[in-house]
Amino acid sequence: MSKYYQPEIETASPEQIRALQDERLVRQVKHVWDNVPYYRKKMEEKGITPDDIKSVDDLKKLPFVTKADLRDCYPYGLLAKPLSECVRIQSTSGTTGKRVVAFYTQHDIDLWEDCCARAIMAAGGTNEDICQVSYGYGLFTGGPGLNGGSHKVGCLTLPMSSGNTERQIQFMTDLGSTILCCTPSYAAYLAESIEEMGLRDRIKLKAGIFGAEAWSENMRRDIEDKLGIKAYDIYGLTEITGPGVSFECEEQTGMHINEDHFIAEIIDPETGEVLPEGEKGELVFTSITKEAFPLLRYRTRDICILSRKKCSCGRTLVKMCKPMGRSDDMLIIRGVNVFPSQIEEVLLSIKSGEITPNYQIIVDRVNNTDTFEVNVEMSESFFTDDIKSIANIEKQITDRLRSVLGIGAKVRLVNPKTITRSEGKAVRVIDKRKI
Amino acid sequence: MYITQLSVFVENRVGNLDEILEVLSQNGINIRALSMADTSEFGILRMIVDDTDKAKEKLREIGVVVKSSEVIAQHIDDTPGGLQKVISKLKQGGVSVEYLYAFLNRENDTAQVVLRVDDTKKAEQLLK
């Protein structure tokens, strides 16, 4: 098998890609204008029509789409195809309360899976491989995306989903998995467990595709050494499609963006101006092939740099570096997006607002796994002499956080006014992770 | 007899209890009885002190969450069976005890129990 899934795209000349993008962008803008009144209104407010968009050069004329737009349009407001043509939704957390819901037609699923297939082949995957997908399955895009890509490559796919480490390792050793797909922190955890169980000699892994959270080069080397593999990064977001928006090749110096489907721009997060290539700024994506949920100029809030330096793998697709930070307050904890405002909302929803929403999030990384603690200030309005009723409120907070965020937090009740304040403003997030 | 009890929230952190006790000591407040209830995450310190209002005020000043409430303080004989006599009376009246703690009164050699029950009024009548 070739090392490319779609060589005609992955190794096309920049001119060919550009021509494809021009044509697809023009068509996509028309599609959105015709089918998404919300975005059409945004365009009208800027005084532009689809006739103004003739090529990628005109992209900068289009208005941005932000998380706030997704929230305002929840759930159907940005849908561009009738529901009868949609076959799937995936979802991720939104800024406040409402989740982001993304829709897919069968065509959209196909192109997403193609993107993931490219990532798997870039990591050396072929139809001879056994691909263990240990990302979560369900609303989270990680599992379904890599699962689909693995099928397209023709790997024997193990749809493990996340968790149940013993069973993961049992399948890995008994069936001889050769590729592992999961979050980097889970990979590190698996690596440690394998070491502890003395099973290093019995695993046949050669590559890992790890994404959905930040990880350092040190962590990469550590996982590579412990598992005896090459570890590849993968990037994506539900709003745009899911994992596979970009992927790493054997050079391991950035992720190739699937430019035939997504046009990337780097903007100044303050002014919204497009920055010249090579400058650091906020990453913006325009999806030019998706039918059901086609976002134009979606602001990812990820801070990043793009590079067109020639890559030794032969791919000509532009490369993005690992995201270097965020231009908003979103945290990624164990691969899950967490907004501090979600925690405030949970606290306000408990016991009809008796709890002061004075909280502090403390995130750390211990043994390559994120720890997540939420400190909540006790107040006289919810303190009682009855230990059971306080413990019960504490449990309600824990349960609600889990259901809203999708991950568990350790809730600690603390004395009033003990949460650090900086110039009168409470410090909501303490992120001790050194990535 | 009713008596005022202070309930204090104690954060699960090294030194928090010490801070609370230090305030009481610095202000010359004497603890006559106390009990500590705890879960793995936090605790409630229940106390009878000699100057309830002052204790409350001083604890609030350092940001401690404190509440006062009326509990039953019942004299019992400091002899075998003394406590059981009281509990039996409550049982016969169908009153359930949520918690209790006891202390000795050195001056007249009696013991006292502090009782929190589910029906305070009824308990009082039963114990008359």
Image: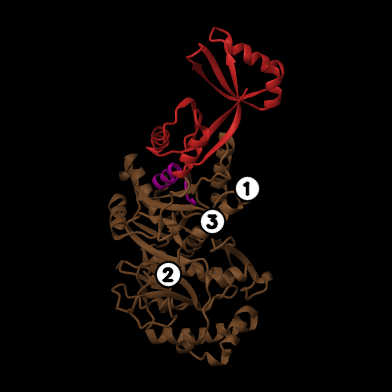
Chain colours: A brown, B red
Picture quarter with the C terminus of chain A:
bottom left
Subunit bearing disc 3: A
Q: Which residue is mark 1?
A: A351
Magenta segment boundaries in residue numbering: A160-173
Amino acid on which the number 2 mark rests in the picture: Ser
The residue nearer to you, when weighing A174 against A92, is A92
> Percent from the top left, x then y, of residue B20?
42, 36
**Mark earlier in primary sequence (1, 2):** 2
> Percent from the top left, x then y, of residue A410?
47, 45
Amino acid on which the number 3 mark rests in the picture: Glu
Picture quarter with the N terminus of chain A:
bottom left
Mark 3, secondary structure of its residue = helix
Q: Nearer the viewer, mark 1 or mark 2?
A: 1
The residue nearer to you, when weighing A306 against A329, is A329
Tell me the residue at 30%/69% (across/down). A253
Mark 1, secondary structure of its residue = helix
Q: Nearer the viewer, mark 3 or mark 2?
A: 3
Mark 2, secondary structure of its residue = loop
Q: Which residue is mark 3?
A: A344
- Badge 2, how many Cα within 10 Å: few under 14, some, many 20+? some
Q: Which residue is mark 2?
A: A327
